[in-house]
Image: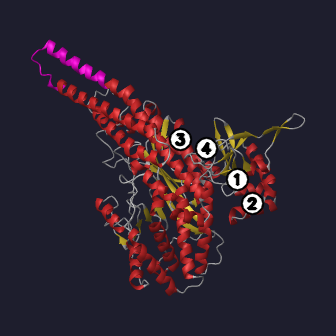
Amino acid sequence: MSDFLQTFSCDVFTDKEMKARLPKEVYGKLKKTIEAGTELDPSIADTVANAMKEWALERGATHYTHWFQPLTGVTAEKHDAFLSINKQGKAILDFEGKHLIKGEPDASSFPSGGLRATFEARGYTAWDCTSPAFLREDALGVTLCIPTAFCSYTGESLDQKTPLLRSMQAIDKESLRLVRMFGDDKAKRIIPMVGAEQEYFLVDKDIYNKRKDLIYTGHTLFGAMPPKGQELSDHYYGIINERVGAYMKDINQELWKLGVPAKTQHNEGAPSQHELAPLYEQCNIATDHNQMTMETMKRVAGRHGMVCLLHEKPFAGVNGSGKHNNWSLATDLGRNLLKPGDKPHENLEFLLILTCVIKAVDEHADLIRYSGSNVGNDLRLGGNEAPPAVISVFLGEQLQDILDQFAEKGSATHSLRGGKLKTGVAVLPDFNKDATDRNRTSPFAFTGNKFELRILGSSDSLAMSNIVLNTIVAEAFKDACDELGEHPDQQEIGKYIAKTFKEHRKVVFNGNGYDADWVKEAKKRGLPNLKSMVDAIPCITDKKAVDLFEKFGVFTKSELDSRAEIEFEMYAKEINIEARTMLDIATKQIIPAVVSYIGSLAGAKIAVNTAVPTADTSVQETLVSECSALLAETKKSMDKLQKELDKAAALPSGEKSARAYRYKVFPAMEALRAPVDALEMRVDKACWPMPSYGDIIF
């Protein structure tokens, strides 16, 4: 057997380890909780904790931590040693059930959006036994990491995992009602399944360290495009160079040991951009694994003298990085509910699910757009392989035709076929084509047996997008089941499919999402176009969203209000950091360098004219004039940016402050960047104070 198969999940407390180390009765109870979603029996906690401790100690662990996902965009952990002291003063190894199932990290320093005052410090982490514990080895040694949820003293969610698990419960319940309608009485659970394609950039660490903007913000705030970008498409799927290949090999080995099923790797569209994609997994495990993937990618890059950039738009003018969230529904017996089958026009269960998803997206397009919102993604959406901010559904010709038939007649009589692909080369086999092409400009595309949500930013957690998808589809399923009842006939189901599609077909668009005419058409159809994060945030606190999430127990109104407050504040803080970084670079690096360069040009002109009075020094004069004008524009833009920053900083935190940073400070930042980038194209490279785009991405 290959080495990587032998080491896969070797650092995970797997089902195999649990079965081998736990008494049969304890294993059975824990397995029931994991597979059936029943409440954890607290009586087994001590036994499970002891088995987990023994396994971890055998692997060299000295500490354990509750690993959780607060509303900071990254994970958090507090480490405790297994060390304890008994009454005789002797050192012992201690890890009891109470240590496993509950932790008490200080919650006061994490974002709470007003849910907790600073002096109300208590928070709880609760063991998520459905996501396996794992070991992480780094400079600290070996640590047992226990995936947990994170809640306040009052029980309100302060994390990403808790509402995700709630949303999985909601769609499980409503999906079971729907499949029972079609006679499936064997399935006990319906599980949202997710596979996340992760894009990223790799840059040399020495070059990275010479760019303050990369260090402080994760992306470049200045930078002129080099003569060559990605226009030749020679990097996409190109041969992976040796240095990057060594990094990818290291990443795969680290992830496989953690049980992350890393499957695909390749060069992406932009120079220095790459992608990693795993196999499908249960939604909450996929979310945990993606967080582990991002952490591992950053850590391993350092070993290879590189830095992994997960910002959505590290470099202007080339592709940004996203995270494609491939989403489907499966029974606990492995049946994919989004598989159309050979004759999709006859598959009423699939078509009902499909139209329910279309309805859900149409009714809650704003929430989907919100779920892919962050500061970096505002720079990415709308071009260069990123979908537009207008949310639409791509179905393809086959499914579009079937639903059109239903809309006209209440049923469908045929499915379009893909036909044969013929290359015209005798030695190449002919084979059956898919019935429809793909659409890379669609934010939410059906791709054969799943939906691909393409709007997520590369640094995002998968949690919020899947919370939204699970909840809005649960609502659509509930509406269908409430209206159709337990035993509808085929004609009734056909009428519901036809009615639902006709009511919500406006959200279906199979064309080019980058076309300017589509934005106009979308407006005519009444589809929202939330162009920025600041525009999208308010949708989670409107009555429609509050009613939706409270109805399914996913969020309370106070939890939604807190998230809106946190995100407005985070937006303002991030733009503030970026603006201050721009001013710092311009003041301390750009202006001194340009002044020095202009001085050298002027000195050269004088020296030439002194030596040869009749010499043509028009080039020097032109350069001095152009650089001086751009320098003056730079200083004027800096003063304007500082003025807008001061105004925004004086506002209380919240929506008004975030809007000031978005619509006043951000445009002033763009105005400052323009003359600086123009100067970079004129100033001698030896005088320019930081590495260029060409230095970084090539």
Question: How far, Cα to Cα, is label 3 from label 2?
Answer: 35 Å
Question: How far, Cα to Cα, is label 1 from label 4?
Answer: 19 Å
**Residue closer to the observer: 416 or 673:** 673
* Magenta span dominant secondary structure: helix
Secondary structure of the residue carrying numbered label 2: loop
Q: Which of disc 1 and disc 3 is earlier in sequence?
A: 1
Q: Nearer the viewer, mark 1 or mark 4?
A: 4
Q: Position of residue 500 (x, y in %)?
A: 45, 77
Q: Which amino acid, mark 1?
A: Trp
Residue on which the image places disc 4? 110
Q: Which residue appears at 49% of the width and 47% of the height?
A: 654
Q: Which of disc 4 and disc 3 is earlier in sequence?
A: 4
Which residue extends farthest left? 614
Numbered mark located on residue 298 in the image:
3
Question: How far, Cα to Cα, is label 3 from label 1?
Answer: 26 Å
Q: Is residue 60 left or right of residue 72?
A: right
Please provide the residue range marked out in magenta.
Answer: 594-619
Q: Which amino acid, mark 3?
A: Lys
Q: Is residue 608 above or below residue 228?
A: above
Q: Position of residue 570 (x, y in %)?
A: 50, 45
Residue on which the image places disc 2? 40
Question: How far, Cα to Cα, is label 3 from label 4?
Answer: 23 Å
Q: Which amino acid, mark 2?
A: Leu
Q: Are marks 1 and 2 in contact (CB under 8 Å)?
A: yes
Residue on which the image places disc 1? 127
Q: Position of residue 553 (x, y in %)?
A: 62, 63
Question: How far, Cα to Cα, is label 1 from label 2?
Answer: 10 Å
Residue 70 visible in image? yes
Q: Which of disc 4 and disc 1 is earlier in sequence?
A: 4
